[in-house]
Image (tube, rainbow, N blue to C red):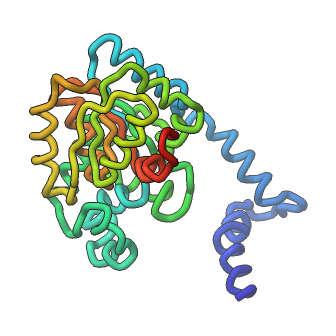
Amino acid sequence: MEEALERGRYEGGEMLLEQAVPAGFSSGDLTLREVIAAGVEALRPRLLPLIDAAGVYHAFEAALAEGRPISVVRLGDGELLALAHDAVYDAETVRREAPFLAAAGLVVPDHAARARLAEAVRQATIVGVPISRRRHFGQLLGPALAANGIDLRALRLTESTINYSLYQTGLLTRLLAGRRTLVIGNAAPGLAERLQQAGFAVTGVITPVRGFPDIDRVIGEAAAARDSFDLALVAAGIPAVVIASLLAAQFGKAALDFGHLADHIASRPPGQI
């Protein structure tokens, strides 16, 4: 095991440094960490800025105050693999490496769903992207978007855990205060109960959301309730990206892809979020 780990460390790092050193030179006492840090600094102009939690909060506040649509969606490994199937990886590879996708709302192959997801990313106001450089996270971000004709550098970006950042900084409760909230997803009833117990106005619940086939029904129900909510929290797996984007684009609403934070809040003691 240790030998395999050492080989992985070498081939994934030190060997690349070894190959990059020009002939006639030695890397001497340079460490891989030093080289990477220097390289990142040299490439700083190519790094993509991320809007922090305060910036996302203020974007929501401004949009709500001015009656403008805003959607904040998030791309994790599920969303990226959904975009990547039969575009970066074949569908069988994605099925094998990501058996959780069906539970997250997408049964591959589904090219129509992939196209719908890609369009939602293009339409979104702000897109959360992973910081992790693991294989199906940061490493897949560029290829998955490019394979669907999405220019990563044209997007306004935040971190993919922006939902938790808003929650942990207390900005989520400030955003919800005094606003009519629609909650969407399988955890919506429990989430709605906790929010109401904590004094927030939940004016609608749409549940369940059974994957991509349910998106149009959910949007139809939201359309019927469009005059009764200001902000939507959408916790519906991969379809949440599409739903949040459509709520903003079609109805001029504010929508946040809420993810598993809905389950966390639903599990809190009564009166607490």
In the image, is residue 11 above or below residue 83?
Answer: below
Question: Position of 16 compared to 244: left or right?
Answer: right
Residue at left offset 22%, top offset 54%? 209
Residue 154 occupies quadrant:
top left
Q: Residue placed farthest to the top in the image?
A: 66
Does residue 7 appear anywhere in the picture?
yes
Residue 42 occupies quadrant:
top right
Q: How many numbered marks, from 0 up?
A: 0
| Quadrant placement of the N terminus | bottom right
Q: Nearer the viewer, residue 227 or 147?
A: 227
Q: Nearer the viewer, residue 144 or 185?
A: 185
Q: Nearer the viewer, residue 153 or 24?
A: 153
Residue 124 percent coordinates (x, y): 30, 35
Question: Position of 250 compared to 25: left or right?
Answer: left
Residue 16 percent coordinates (x, y): 66, 66
Question: Position of 40 compared to 245: left or right?
Answer: right
Q: Residue placed farthest to the right in the image?
A: 29
Residue 243 percent coordinates (x, y): 23, 43
Does residue 149 appear anywhere in the picture?
no
In the image, is residue 237 above or below residue 135?
Answer: above
Residue at left offset 48%, top offset 44%? 270
Residue 59 percent coordinates (x, y): 42, 21
Residue 193 occupies quadrant:
top left
In the image, is residue 253 above or below residue 159?
Answer: above
Residue at left offset 11%, top offset 47%? 216
Residue at left offset 68%, top offset 85%? 4
